[in-house]
Image (cartoon, helix red, strand yellow):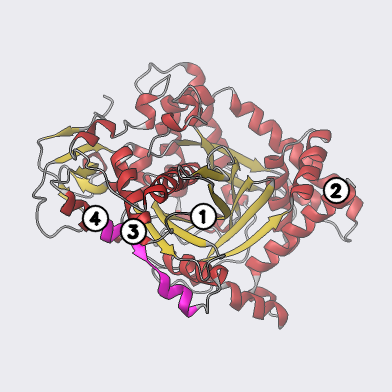
Amino acid sequence: MAPNLSWQSGAPIEILGRASPPSRPIWFRHQTPLECTVDGSTLITTSIQLSPPSPSPHELNLDVVRAAVRQLRWDHPAIANEHGWSGPPPAAEHAVFAYEVPGSESDIDVWLSQVVVDSRSRLLDANGDIEKAVDTLMHDLCKAHPLKAPFFLVHYLPAASLAGKHALSFSFNHAVFDAAGSFQIMDLCVSRIADALATGGERSPLPWGEEISRLPPAFVESARIPHTADKIPEDEFMVQRVKDVAQTLSTAHTLPGPRFQPFPSSTGAFMRTASPDVLTTLRTTARQNGATVFSLLMATASLSCIRVRSPVDTANVTLPFLHSPVNGRSLACTDPDDRSQWSVRISMGFNSYATRDLGRFVRSSDDSRQLIEDVWVLAREVRKQTEEQKRHMERMPVWGDDVLAAISEAFSDESIKSSRWSPILSSIGVVDTYLARSHAVATGGELTVSSPLLRPTYPPSFVGCSVALHAFTWGGKLMLTFSFPEGSMGSAEDQAIALKEGRNDDAIGLQFVNEFMYILDVIAQSAQ
């Protein structure tokens, strides 16, 4: 029987972290298996910079941001959701999202004080360097314990000068926000800031309690083909694919495993950017070679892995990836780019990939022409896997839970635990329609957005995966974030020092990043 995913009230709910039962009305809905699996143990941290119009009758300040977030909660109340239980935890069937209805504006002010943070001290510590302040803040946000953090959190850093840029750094709970959703909610927040900037943060009365009508249903329930639809034989294809890819876990090629594992581990990151010209070149040459940017990136990651750490035995070398995220928004709305159809909920599923027989690409010499040929051979193989799965995506809400169960079963095998130390890739695609370059201010001019950053964290209990690459394009640039668990691999600074001193085993993550960027550069140069 399918679980009841409707929002309801009246039942007693225990909210995570609360010492006593909530005193105000609670609306809740049960979590889907995917939402429950993510379980709030992962954060997605992001950042953007803002330039208000000049001149402007009102300044951009903390009060304006607070007024904007207040309006954002009214429009999208799910940002104030909390984890809860309808029965004894930690049984998955009892996990719920809980929304506590505010009784007055004072309740909203208390909530705003928890989720909108004045971080001007960060700017002072960085001597007015907004880039440095943001980098330090995002790194610290990645140290936070996700289960104790709000689902939605924003830090405001004011401009260091009249002509300077302001910054917002966000922390989102992955149980509600996937990567694409993180860009959407940033855009919606900026839109409300632009509105609030026109009035100086003036607040209009809102009838709190009515917003519950906008609590969104689960993605799998509102999809055109919902999770309750009858299964057909073709749905088994994606489940069997996971099982087939899982068979390669025992021969997975990994980067050197962890040396030490403090609990929990903070998340480090290397950030890289490819210019619009380079991205255009990569996209064009990928098409000419029967590939896509995604398949190029996955092929590059696979080849980087074996070039950084060449396999001793080249027979049957694989690099499996059971849970490649797929954006499912087009399955639940008529136009994914229409802001009025955006919902605060995780809206994704998974594809499964395996790059196989990687031993054929182990070369005794570094011949750039051979490397280019190898990249396109592997990229075409990856694209073929994408095409095989694409025709099944419309029914993702139907087979999604079965795929998730197959993935969980595969990773429960202790004998393949070391295989998690293979790099993974999450390609978010073009996000310009999710994060606008600017928003009009009613009093004139525009509030301009720049420098978007994305840095997902690792779950505290997850010690696998050496490097996770999250890639997206915005403003014509290809943005690459290589995240890694610092507890196992050391910080970015530690790895840079180790590489400079020739301690390569202590700089595996940085070596992988450098090799990845080198291969992309070779491909781009070959097309010019």
Q: CA distance from mark 4 to mark 3?
A: 14 Å
Residue 121 is inside the magenta segment: yes
Q: Are marks 2 and 4 in contact (CB under 8 Å)?
A: no
> Could you give the CA–CA distance between mark 3 and mark 2, rounded to whole angstroms?
54 Å
Asked where in the image residue 312 lies, by quadrant, the reply is: bottom right
Q: Which residues are magenta?
A: 111-125
The residue wearing badge 2 is: 372
Q: Is residue 230 left or right of residue 308?
A: left
Q: Is residue 132 visible?
A: yes
Q: Residues within 10 Å of mark 1 (few under 14, many from 20)?
A: many
Residue topped by disc 1: 52
The kind of residue tagged 1 is Pro
**In this rendering, the label closer to the viewer, 2 or 4:** 4
From the image, state whether disc 3 or disc 2 is nearer to you. 3
Location of residue 223 in the rendering, given as x and y in whole percent from the top left corner: 41, 24
Q: Earlier in the sequence, mark 2 or mark 4?
A: 4
In the displayed structure, 404 sits above or below 118; it is: above
Locate residue 131: give its quadrant.
bottom right
Q: Position of residue 505 (x, y in %)?
A: 65, 74
Per the model, the C-alpha gap separating discs 2 and 4 is: 54 Å
